[in-house]
Image (cartoon, rainbow, N blue to C red):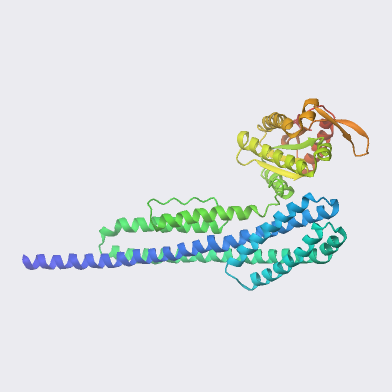
Amino acid sequence: MRKLFSTVTKKVVIGYLVIVFFTLGAVGYALYQLHQQTRHTEHLVQIEFSTFELLRDLQQNLLALENIEKQLLILRDVELIDLRRNRNDELVRHVLTLQGLPSNEQSQTLLQILDAYRQADKHLAAALQHEDWVVATALSGSTMVPLRTQIVELLVAYRERQQQQINTDLTRLSQKTSAAFRATVLLTLFGICLSAPVTITVIISIHRSVKALKRATQSISAGRFDHRLELPGDDEFSELAHDFYQMGEKLRELEQLHLDANPLTLLPGNRAIDRAIDTRINQKIDFCHLYIDLDNFKSYGDRYGYKAGSDVISQVGNLIQAVVNECGHPDDLVGHIGGDDYVVVTSPDKGEVLAQTIISRFDEMVPTLYSPEDRQAQSFVGKDRYGVERTFPLLSISIAVIHSTRYKYPSRLAISQDCARLKEYLKLQDGSTYMVEEHRE
């Protein structure tokens, strides 16, 4: 009996040791691969994505500087010098950040040209400070514009290479996750075949976590950045899940960079609006198109200046976005065509509600945009585009609401033509107003 007990005990001990060995091997391998992938993910988030965002910010800063420089040389408004100086300070901060990132041949070339650009900018700044407009114009055309064009071209090429690197790293991460999953499962199954019921819990846990990580990696690689990976606990799996979520957020932001967002309101531009309309038309989804236009905006800008007009455009964009967020649907689109024209694409049941709410909120905001004298008089005297003095009312807003159901075959051209027709009619009315056309032609 003792011999039997000893033999059984030995088998149990040997079996247990084998189970422990293979279980520890599977867990150790999985954790090692997880640690490697976590470090890889951190590198993606901290280096690759940061570099991509920095290149985007540099490009936007240079384009903004170009616009300010053109306005300054045309208008010769010394108040724009401070705005230009602030943009230059922001450019310097971006350059310093770029210098702190790991360097390569492209970044070194970019930094050299940026240094030349900053040296040339000092001469231009000196000429502007002394209001030597002739010298400033010459420096801008002969030096600043070519350098700025060269830098923007380098930034575009650099960003494309960075995007390719990110895609390659994501694919490699997915492949490593799949390989780690297969190896872990093989080791664990081998331990189970040796009668290791003790390891079942560990196998299920690792199997579930690795499969979740694999799905998340494949989802992100396929461009579905809204995948939310939920893993319990506070271990490396949860840490990697958090990193995956952050990576998805970063990639969603990078995807939005492809939209032609308006630099003043940051709202999507014409291409995004066209795509939203075409998608609904192709999928035969009924929708409502709101064309929003400010009335008397030119006279307001002539009276209060370019900066005040830009602020109004930005505030109206924020107002429309806030109303759509509050009263519309999550998949509604708020777009900025340009100037004082906006577009909202929503469902048919929300079009009129949004128009009414936008008008109500806008009319509440309008008095705050004027001086006390103009606000009290509800108008002001100014010159129209022909130089004739006339009395202008306060800002108002016109909204043309077009339902896609009014067309047998809806198209962007038909909708835009009807919007233009309604806009002309609404501008003849007093105050803020809207008009809905939903019946079929």
Number of numbered callouts drawn: 0
When asked about the image quadrant of residue 428, the answer is top right
The picture places residue 321, in percent across and down from the top left corner, at 66, 39
Front-lying residue, 75 or 226: 75
Assign the N terminus to one quadrant of the image: bottom left
Q: Residue at x 80, y 39 (%)?
A: 304
Q: Say which quarter of the image contains residue 85.
A: bottom right
In the image, 112: left or right of 128?
Answer: left
Q: Can residue 46 be seen at all in this image of the molecule?
A: yes
Question: With respect to residue 418, does 110 lie above or below?
Answer: below
**Is residue 23 depicted above or below 411 in this figure?**
below
- As drawn, the residue found furthest toward the front would be 130
Q: Nearer the viewer, residue 109 or 416?
A: 109
**Residue 229: percent from the left, percent from the top?**
46, 52
Image quadrant holding the C terminus, namely: top right
Q: Which quadrant of the figure has residue 73?
A: bottom right
Q: Residue at image x 52%, y 66%? A: 172
Q: Which residue extends farthest left?
A: 1
Using the rendered image of the protein, determine whether residue 174 is visible from the camera's viewpoint: no
Q: Residue 123, image x and y in percent?
A: 78, 64
Using the image, determine if residue 127 lies above or below residue 260. Answer: below
Q: Position of residue 329 (x, y in %)?
A: 61, 37
236 displayed left or right of 367:
left
> Is 395 in front, or is 354?
395
Q: Is residue 343 above or below residue 361?
A: below
Residue furthest bottom as drawn: 105
